[in-house]
Image: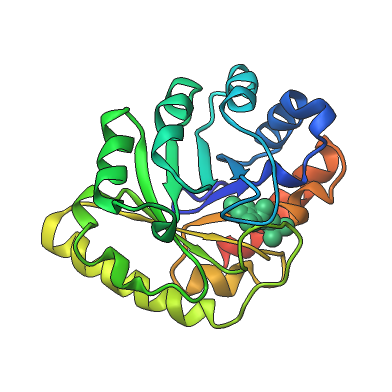
Amino acid sequence: MKDNRFKIAPSILSADFARLGAEVEDVIKAGADWIHFDVMDNHYVPNLTFGPMVCKAIRPWTKAPIDVHLMVEPVDSLIEPFAKAGADYITFHPEASRHVDRTLSLIRENGCKAGLVLNPATSLDWLTYEMDKIDMVLLMSVNPGFGGQSFIPETLHKLQECRWILDQYEKKTGKKILLEVDGGVKIDNIAEIAAAGAEVFVAGSAVFSGKNYEGYKKIINNFRKELDGV
Ligand SMILES: O=C(CO)[C@@H](O)[C@H](O)COP(=O)(O)O
Ligand SMILES: [Fe+2]
């Protein structure tokens, strides 16, 4: 059974780029909740992927939220193009924006949900004065730039700390901020990552190792079984 507390967001970084639309359709039909869209610019991170035109191209293939993870510097000039291309969530790394508060406002003014992405060595302090403008926090559990890396175990403690901060804020204001984790999420660690407080799980290599719709379904079902026990 699908537990609404938890969202599974396959990163299409590990999909077959030659048939991206069909891949998006297949993982969502296979039970995933969101599509995670990794944008890399060969400047903020040492890799290069895709931009708003590719987001626009996959948009008609699903109604599921598209979660755009910007690993680009500068950030602001890409926000309106991604909003127009159909992004639902736009997240960015605070180190990559000269005016973080302005960037968060820009994302919201463009009708999208806004999130900050914190690298393994980046402090949770970035959240302190921006909670009102944040819809989601994304904690990187690998250094950004590549799929297929191993989960950094220290992230578990950081997730617990962040969970506490978000829960306190929700108690005080009634506003729910989602906690997402990205990098090295696998069948053998998803349960402890959930227990540490994550609610949205990005998984690229793990899901797409399934190779086709049937394979994706098996892997996503196994993720759900693990999450059911949390
Ligand atoms: O943002 C990134 C990497 O920078 C991620 O979204 C990866 O694409 C996740 O891939 P896996 O670790 O699940 O293979
Ligand atoms: Fe990502």
| Residue 90 in the image: above or below residue 47 | above
How has the structure been colored for display? rainbow
Looking at this view, name the residue that lies furthest to the right.
211
The mark total stands at 0
User: Depth check: 225 or 76 in front?
Assistant: 76
Which quadrant of the structure image shows residue 169? bottom left
**Residue beneath the point at 61% across and 61% down:** 144
User: Depth check: 22 or 84 in front?
Assistant: 84
**Residue beneath the point at 84% across and 51% down:** 209
Looking at this view, name the residue that lies furthest to the left.
172
Q: Position of residue 149 (x, y in %)?
A: 73, 67
**Residue beneath the point at 69% across and 45% down:** 48
Which quadrant of the structure image shows residue 212? top right
User: Depth check: 103 or 176 in front?
Assistant: 103
Image-based side of 65 in relation to 223, left or right: left
Image-based side of 42 in relation to 201, left or right: right
Image-based side of 22 in relation to 10, left or right: right
User: Depth check: 75 or 16 in front?
Assistant: 75
Q: Position of residue 98 (x, y in %)?
A: 34, 53
Q: Position of residue 4 (x, y in %)?
A: 46, 47
**Residue beneath the point at 16% across and 63% down:** 171
| Residue 144 in the image: above or below residue 40 | below
Q: Quick check: can you spot residue 230?
A: no
Q: Position of residue 161 (x, y in %)?
A: 36, 78
Which quadrant of the structure image shows residue 110? top left
Q: Quick check: can you spot residue 26?
A: yes
